[in-house]
Amino acid sequence: RKRVVVFISGSGSNMEKLAEACEAPDFPAEIVAVISDKPDAGGLLKAKARGIATYALARKDYDSKQAHEAAMLGLLADLAPDFICLAGFMRLLSGDFIRAYAGRIINIHPSLLPLFPGLDTHQRALDAGMRIAGCSVHFVTEGMDEGPIIGQAAVPIVPGDDADALAERILTVEHRLYPATLRRLAAGEVRMENGRAVFTNRGTDGAEQ
Ligand code: GAR
């Protein structure tokens, strides 16, 4: 089974869904640790309750972004992950960090990328008058939310939606998409090659209905 480390900053509901999926005996990955840049992230308690090793490395405990990342990289060297899943991790990783795990870091973002990268995505989708929204799982590259897309799921936007209602609807499909995507990645059905997501299995084109 592939070794996975999950990075979080918040409530960790996606992390929990990944952990749940990993409990199935035929799932090709296991979560070996959860790392948070926020010591009070609710997801840390959820991970602990599941018996997963947790680490909190607060940015403010380090003099620079470089020192903070060096500490995370040191920890990762011991954990020896095959893959890193960013799940509500709200910090932009440097090029050096990303290159150290090239093609092995994935992220979930609550929009249909390449639309609405960055913050405040739900409100921006509403303001743009979109009639659908969704989420994307992508390989992490240096540009924010710019890496090759592995999987997406869509939801309708309905009259009366506000950002919270939309976020909640998208989160329910995130919870299915992220484990399904990790399964494909860990099973070797998709990899990053020349800046593209390359699928090796027919029928696994990354679209979730
Ligand atoms: C999720 O909606 C995730 O897509 C989003 O934060 C939420 C985390 O929820 N991520 C980003 O906005 C990344 N830029 P969770 O902590 O309950 O999984």
Image (tube, grey):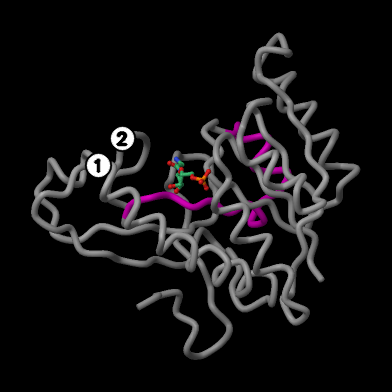
Q: Amino acid at mark 2?
A: Asp
Image coordinates of residue 65 in percent, x first then y, are: 65, 19
User: How busy is the neighbourhood of tag 1: few (under 14 within 10 Å), some, or many (20 plus)?
Assistant: some
In front: 3, or 18? 18
* Mark drawn on residue 101: none
**Magenta part of the protein: which range?**
93-111
Residue located 36% across and 67% down the image: 153
Q: Which residue is mark 1?
A: 163
The relative height of residue 95 versus residue 83 in the rendered view (above or below) is: above
Residue located 45% across and 67% down the image: 151
Q: Which residue is mark 2?
A: 120
Q: Is residue 23 left or right of residue 182?
A: right
Image coordinates of residue 92 in percent, x first then y, are: 53, 32
Q: Is residue 67 left or right of residue 147?
A: right
Q: Report if the beta carbon of the residue with label 1 is closer than 8 angstroms to ligand 1.
A: no
How far apart in space, not on screen, are marks 2 and 1 (Cα)?
9 Å
97 part of magenta stretch: yes
Image coordinates of residue 161 in percent, x first then y, are: 16, 49
